[in-house]
Image: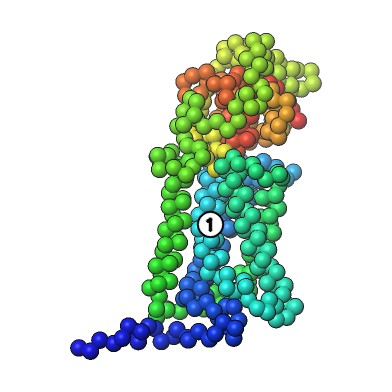
Amino acid sequence: MVRRPASLNRPAFRRPVPPAALTTLPERFTSRLHDERVAAWLGIALGTCFLVAFVTGLVSHFMQHPAGWMVWPSRPVNLYRVTQGLHVMTGLAAVPLLLAKLWTVYPRLLQWPPARSVLHAVERLLVFVLVGGSLFQLVTGVMNIDYWYAFGFFFTTAHYWTAYIVIGALVIHVANEWAKTRRTVMTRPQDGLKRRTFLLTVFGASGVVVATTVGEAVSPLARLAVLAPRRPGIGSQDLPVNKSAAASGVTALARDPRWRLTVTGRVDRELSLSLAQLQAMPARTARLPIACVEGWSAEATWEGVRLRDLLRMAGVDDDAHVRVESLERYGLYRTSMVQPPHWHDPLTLLALRVNGEPLDLDHGYPCRLIAPNRPGVMQTKWVGRLVVA
Ligand code: HEM
């Protein structure tokens, strides 16, 4: 049999490349991996991740800053744990997808002339907003969950407003590219092997990132979570700690034997309880997670006094909103609000013990709030006062 020279076996559609000087930039990139099909599939995966991250991010935002008409339920117990875990996982999965997507389309980003008309210029500007905003979200998001606050701005506010800009630019981009994307993914390619391998590698990389992090929220997978900054089961009393008593400046106040819990209900009724008096009240147990805004979560068995019992002793009205105040003097999270569905819930405790031991100082000794379906930053530690707001 006569063997064909290898050069003749190359696919016929590979156009000969004209000299660089005669080409526009995109034409100089001949790899099939820079084509519409790869860009379309990566775009679909990336868009899905961003949509999930946006919706779950809004859940996190409005749980912490509810609009006047919003009342969050206290059940299901693990709702916030799932939404915020999903938020960070889809955000992390998006990192390899975004890098691959940028590599696939960068010849188009370098297009010359940069714009053919005013409309085209606006369209391209929006793409640059989308690229810049996405990189900003993912880079600062990863830095934040790694507790690396090297940026000089408040992460949450910047992240929140950038999310609207990114999603706005994404919606316009999708509307623009929808017909092309649909056509591309509906047709069967003749020569798909190289693209398939590339896409599988990128999706595999996303999968590896998730598999090596998801254990920070899913306890049975904790040992796999080598990329996670926090892991269930690791920390004092088998629970991770984000902010210690020393870092919060409360060590002396929390250890003071004169500590008392003040509960201000009706103007004419204020309770002041010592630790011994709290310990003498009927003890309740709840198995609840601490679900951190940074995506990690860990379950524990908490023991303490039901918040509703204390508030009723102080004559608090059923529809009251209650402010829980920490001994901390400063800090964004030194107080948190508890709405009726949460303080009526029998699982909401002022915890005195965790996993069978008195609370460690770093977990909020002498007592802390623990409630179902609530971000960790709102599970106030070192509680000194409950006030009807
Ligand atoms: C690697 C990627 C990402 C990571 C690691 C990440 C991480 C986080 C963290 C830690 C928070 C909680 C902040 C706090 O309350 O202290 C958060 C909130 C949020 N995220 Fe992300 N995020 C990522 C990507 C995204 C993306 C792609 C979007 C939307 C396009 C998004 C939208 C939001 C929103 C709207 C919030 C609520 C902000 C607030 O509380 O005001 N995130 N994210």
Point 46% across, 56% down: residue? 206
Residue closer to the observer: 230 or 150: 150
Q: In the rendered structure, which amino acid carries the disc numbered 1?
A: Ala
Q: Is residue 299 visible?
A: yes
Color style of the picture: rainbow
Please provide percent x and percent y for residue 173. 63, 69
Residue closer to the observer: 261 or 43: 43
Please provide percent x and percent y for residue 255. 62, 15
Q: Is residue 151 above or below residue 338?
A: below
Q: Is residue 203 above or below residue 321?
A: below
Q: On the picture, is 57 further left or further right than 301?
A: right
Point 68% across, 33% down: residue? 333
Residue closest to the far bottom = 2
Q: Is residue 70 visible?
A: no
* Picture quadrant where residue 314 is located: top right
Residue closer to the observer: 208 or 372: 208
Q: On the picture, is 14 further left or further right than 153?
A: left
Please provide percent x and percent y for residue 288. 51, 32
* Picture quadrant where residue 177 is located: bottom right
Question: Which corner quadrant holds the N terminus?
Answer: bottom left
User: How many numbered callouts?
Assistant: 1
Point 49% across, 78% down: residue? 30
Q: Is residue 211 above or below residue 233?
A: below
Q: Is residue 49 above or below residue 322?
A: below
* Picture quadrant where residue 146 is located: top right
Would you call the spot at circle 1 few (<14 residues within 10 Å), some (14-19), or many (20 or more)? many
Question: Which corner quadrant holds the C terminus?
Answer: top right
Q: Secondary structure at mark 1?
A: helix
Residue under numbered circle 1 = 94
Point 56% across, 25% down: residue? 363
Q: On the picture, is 4 further left or further right than 173?
A: left
Tell whether circle 1 marks a residue whose Cβ is less than 8 angstroms from ligand 1: yes
